[in-house]
Image: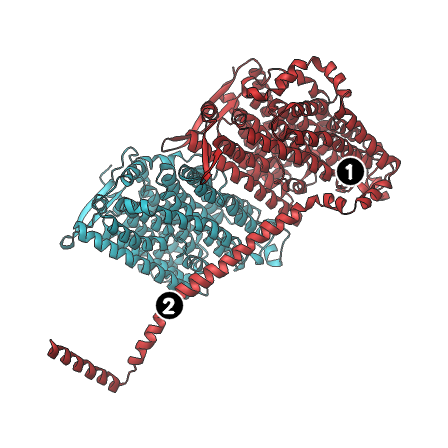
Chain colours: A red, B cyan
Amino acid sequence: MATPAIYLIVPLAPLAGAIVAGLFGRTVGRANAHRITILGVLIAFLTSCYVFADVLEGNAFHGSIYTWMTSGDFKFEIGFLIDRLSALMMVVVTFVSLMVHIYTIGYMAEDPGYQRFFSYISLFTFSMLMLVMSNNFLQLFFGWEAVGVVSYLLIGFWYTRPSAVYANLKAFLVNRVGDFGFILGIGLVLAEFGTLDYSSVFVLAPARASSVIQLFPGVDWMLLTVICICLFIGAMGKSAQFPLHVWLPDSMEGPTPISALIHAATMVTAGIFMVARMSPLYELSTTALSVILVLGGITALFMGLVAMTQFDIKRVVAYSTLSQLGYMTVALGASAYSAAMFHLMTHAFFKAVLFLAAGSVIIAMHHEQDMRRMGGLRKYMPITYFSVLVGAIASAGIPPLAGFFSKDAIIEAVKMSDTPGAAFAYFCVTACVFVTAFYTFRMVFMAFHGEPRMGTAARAHLRESPVVVTLPLLLLSVPSIGAGWLIGQAVYGDYFGPAIIVGPGHAWIEAMTEEYHGVWSYMAHGVSALPFWLAVAGIATAWYLYLVRPELPRRIASGFGPLYALVERKYGFDELYSWLFASGARLLGTGLWKAGDQAVIDGLIVNGAARAVGWFSKVMRLVQSGMIYRYASAMLIGVVLLIYWFLKR
Amino acid sequence: MNGLPLLSISIWLPIAFGLILLATGGDSRASVQRWIALAGAIAGFAVTIPLYAGFDGQTSEMQFSEFQRWMPGLDINYHLGIDGISMLFLLLNSFITILIVVAGWTVVEKRVAQYYAAFLMLSGMLNGVFSALDAVLFYVFFEATLIPMFIIIGIWGGPNRVYAALKFFLYTLFGSLLMLVAFLYLYNKSGSFEILDWHRLPLPLGAQFALFFGLLFGFAVKVPMWPVHTWLPDAHTEAPTGGSVVLAAILLKLGAYGFVRFTLPILPDASRELAWLMVSLSLIAVVYVGLVTLVQADMKRLIAYSSIAHMGFVTLGFFLFNALGVEGALVQMISHGFISGAMFLCVGVMYDRLHTRMIADYGGVVNSMPRFAAFMMLFAMANSGLPATSGFVGEFMVIMGAMQVSFWIAFLAATTLIFGAAYSLWMYKRVIFGPVANDAVRGLRDLNAREFLVLALLAVAVLYMGIYPAPFTDVMHASVDDLLRHVARPKW
């Protein structure tokens, strides 16, 4: 059985790499920086595999590493909870991170910030591992914020670009809004349960299932609903769920490897992981599950629609990520936690492939990202094309690739769910199958098929990317193709065991398990069902519109006019938030400063007091004129008054 | 311990070094004077280390006590002692003094001896404030600190220094006169100036209310609490870097310390009755000042306002009456000492090069000063309360403590997560990131070894306290628990 020392190796190896590459990058040089960080992540990956094998044998670990702090009756600890849920995340995170590290050698080869970049992505790996391995809410929050900071640093990696440093500030602040809710949730957990330790809270929670809390006088709310929604606000920030989704598309300002690692495969799934981890709490609040269902459905469908209108290849993939995160969120709301985690895993692989392949295209195109100036790339970049195709088919949900299985499980579970909002979410995720297939293949057809639309000079430089780029693509394609076949264990088996709790009224996955008779019959059932045909229709439509009648999309777009513009401009949320929050806060701040601090406090009270003193002394100054006769007459009056006073007594 | 009067040494040793410096004469001997100042600062810090090492965290009794009759006719004594609440501030203060001496090494060129003497004497007096157990002794040190600070701003300050120095002086003097009246009343009632006797003095609620407001003015001005905070931005902008550092890191803590040493234990009933007022003022500081901070165009003014917002957490924590709140407030005081000190030093580094504090004059500093940018990133993140930095610990504890009391208090307090990040990182973005804004920025030199050392020491402190705060909180438990038990008991 693995020991705490072995668990510690997993996060600390990447941390060591990050420190060496970050603080001594110039000393060790470029090649050593990538060697050291890759070695660190490789160690973490191999150790994670060992831990994974260990938990498969039924072992688990729950314990503290050190006491962070105590105060009053409360004890805050840093510790690990290693079970099948966290072990799965550890393997996924370290595997994708390893691939991205290798890919970066090629992608960032020309960049002066080479060592810094390796340092950041290793630091990210450390933070993400601390997040998933945590056994308590405090450390979860630590990892939560730490991945946010690394994301901030990486989005703004090219810090001289105004758009990059705008995007990273925006990303951090929107995430902070989520964290604001998150910390309130943590505070409520501590206040009501007296501990932040997961297992203790999970044990105590059922007894409080009917407790109420009055946030407004006279209005009773279920305590656990409030806690769960507060925590979910954190997840909305990190996993970019509507209406806190606005930062993720802008995060594409960062270098592509981190878009794959952080903004597709791992960090943005932290919210999904968190809710799955908290399943014992969420199962006690149907209201919270409803909220999750509805917001997830909105995100899935409406962000997918935006992806249909974008021309920047990275933005298409980014909106696709938002939409897929919506799928996972819907699964959580339908109590299909294992399906959410399964989709999280398959998505991590196929979306990393799509992003890294997009990056490969971007290198070949010399940082051209507009698909309207691509086309026909498959002839020049066969390996990239192959991996894009794998990612696209997986993402569209065509069997036998990974995305089909995980997506189908989600759609089925939502269909069965009777949690309020499930019908809406079912509509969203089903309709979105068409949308997903359409925008994914629109991207494939626009970039890789048809006539090359780039200039002749650019075309002359087109070539397949080096092996450090294509190898990770191929390695990530393997699980993108095959990971779905594990559905029998992961979703319809008892892989997660006690790590995920599903309430008796929400046992849709259990019901589906009885219907499950192996992957072959699952696929046979799948191809006869609606979602599969929607996916095929989506691909066919994309093919017709972008290869057969390429002049049509523009006509359709102008036909829809304002509606199209609304979608293309992302429903105007950026403008709204910028006006309401950014300008609003500045206006309010200026108002308070000028009116409150300067006019009232300083102007009226402080300087007013000074003026009053000044007026008083001015009056007194009249008396002290320096003229003897005035003093003398004043003395005379004084003496007279004194005598009068004495005589009167 | 070893019988040495450590507290007295920690007070008078820096003052003695200051006097020696004054005797060394003019700027022709500046190089020697700097070394004397450094020796004094290091010696001053060295004597505070045994205070931590020999401290017994199990008891709430005063430790390292010293008692001498001073003015027997008036029952005024030279009585010193520290507990878990005050001990860390002596270390913080002496540590910061070293940094100030090093940071000013080549920057201050006129009246070097006087400059350093002022800081060393101020450091000794501040140790006196934190260890005085006699109210008159406390008052003398409390007021005496105004003099060197007034001189520091008035002589080495910026162009508007006279206005700022006077505003600072009058504001705080006004506050402390009301405090003195409260002290005299308490002496009248108890026949003693012993602070610990006052803790046990029974007082009717009406008298407690009156005394509460008397003390409130004295302490609130120092913290500073909204709405008596407007002197701070002026004082900070005009003060030299070292002055801003000691002002933010230590002087602001005097008011907060006053609340926890005087107001809470002497007036527990009034404190509980008026907690709503204190909590409201603190939350206004967090939200209102957070917004005002956002729109500042002058970096020092911005950090000054952010200090007020952060100190709001301190006063909030004290008036929550639970261990998380009070200890969180104390942790926040220490942490704010590191972070605000570091932020002002960062501005100082830039000011020394370009002689401007305006955000608009910078932009793209990272291109010419990458190492500096890395440090300032850490401190800006710490200022916005990032976990694994000290800035998180206190805010986290106070928010958790507030949630024990009321969801809405915690709600308003937690807005600091958004405001803190917004003003810290927005400033960072405009100053550090982006393309090089102008030729002056292009020509900036990165940190020299001396500046690197100062910022590195603070970075270590900020990270250590964030990753492992237990050594800081462990020494507080006994004293804070005792304080909370005491405050919970009615006095009348």
Instruction: Name the mark nearer the viewer: 1 or 2.
Output: 2
Which label is found at residue A457?
none
Instruction: Indicate the position of residue A48 as horizontal and vertical percent values.
Output: 58, 22
Chain containing the residue with disc 2: A
Element assignment for label 2:
helix
Where residue B301 appears, as percent x and y from the top left, is: 48, 56
Seen in the picture, residue B253 relative to A476 is either above or below; the reply is below
State how far apart marks 1 and 2 are (Cα).
70 Å
Residue at x 34%, y 70% (from the top left corner) = A613
Decide which of B410, B24 is in the foreground and name it: B410
> Do the CB atoms of the residues marked 1 and 2 lie less than 8 Å apart?
no
What residue appears at the point 72 percent right and 32 percent down from the top-left corner? Answer: A432
Q: Position of residue B316 (x, y in %)?
A: 39, 45
Q: Chain of mark 1?
A: A
Q: How many marks?
A: 2
Quadrant assignment, res A328: top right
Amino acid type, mark 2: Ala
**Residue occupied by mark 2:** A610
**Residue A54 visible in the displayed image:** yes
Q: Which residue is mark 1?
A: A364
